[in-house]
């Protein structure tokens, strides 16, 4: 994470269903979204904007759900779920957002598993297996769009003198992500996110 070296699996298809833990940081780690006071994150107007757009992800991208997350002064932690496709459900992406960014990391050799198989594995504590979806954008695409949307909104706040100016970019290049393999991994990451303000 320190040198921002990509840790993505080169042949992994990041449109596959599953749970993903992501972290995105502000450029030069500037504290732009609020402050920590006695272990509690106090968001400013920019932090409120970031949170609002994050919560709106499922409204605009029907194949995605958000779970535990936290807006910190200079970064965001969140768990994103890419949901399995349903027969006859059609595209998970609204027409106006389709193919805005390229689709990458496609692995055509990935085995298929149904949703019930994943549920059984979760209950038993085994590793989750990916399920092919009909998503037309990847996790990478989603993060690009989130960064673009929040940057545009942040610039408007700066012009209204409601937010601190940033140098060159709002967000650091790329992001950190981790494929959540099982329920124990999920519990550990949720706990880490919840405790992040106290550990600031």
Image: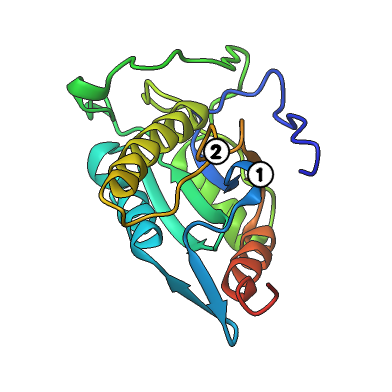
From the viewer's perspective, tell me whether residue 30 is left or right of residue 65: right
- Of 64 and 171, which appears nearest the observer? 171
> Residue placed at 44% from the left, 36% from the top?
147
Q: Is mark 1 on a helix, strand or loop?
A: helix
Q: Which residue lies furthest to the bottom in this view?
A: 38
> Residue placed at 19% from the left, 21% from the top?
95
Q: Looking at the rendering, in which quadrant would you find the N terminus?
A: top right
Q: Is mark 2 on a helix, strand or loop?
A: loop
Marks 1 and 2: which is nearer the front? Answer: 2
Mark before the other along the chain sequence, 1 or 2: 1
Tag 2 residue: 167
Q: Looking at the rendering, in which quadrant would you find the C terminus?
A: bottom right
- Of 62 and 96, which appears nearest the observer? 96
> Residue placed at 70% from the left, 75% from the top?
199
Residue 29, image x, y percentages: 64, 50
Kindly check if marks 1 and 2 are in contact, taking CB atoms under 8 A apart as contact. yes
Tag 1 residue: 28
In the image, residue 121 sits, relative to residue 123, either above or below, namely above
- Identify the coloring: rainbow
Q: In the rendered image, which quarter is residue 108 located in?
A: top right
Q: In the rendered image, which quarter is residue 148 located in?
A: top left
């Amino acid at each position: 994470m320190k040198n921002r070296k990509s840790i993505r699996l080169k042949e992994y298809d990041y449109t596959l269903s599953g749970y993903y833990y992501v972290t995105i940081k502000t450029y030069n780690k500037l504290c732009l979204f609020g402050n920590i006071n006695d272990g509690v994150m106090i968001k400013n107007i920019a932090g409120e904007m970031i949170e609002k757009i994050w919560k709106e992800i499922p409204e605009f991208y029907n194949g995605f759900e958000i779970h535990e997350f936290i807006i910190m002064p200079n970064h965001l932690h969140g768990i994103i779920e890419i949901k399995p496709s349903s027969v006859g459900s059609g595209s998970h992406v609204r027409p106006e957002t389709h193919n805005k960014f390229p689709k990458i990391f496609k692995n055509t050799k990935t085995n298929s598993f149904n949703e019930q198989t994943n549920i059984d594995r979760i209950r038993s504590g085994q590793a989750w297996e990916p399920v092919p979806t009909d998503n037309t954008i990847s996790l990478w695409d989603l993060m690009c769009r989130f960064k673009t949307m929040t940057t545009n909104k942040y610039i408007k706040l700066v012009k209204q003198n409601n937010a601190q100016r940033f140098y060159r970019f709002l967000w650091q290049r790329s992001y950190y992500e981790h494929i959540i393999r099982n329920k124990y991994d999920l519990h550990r990451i949720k706990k880490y996110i919840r405790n992040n303000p106290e550990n600031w």
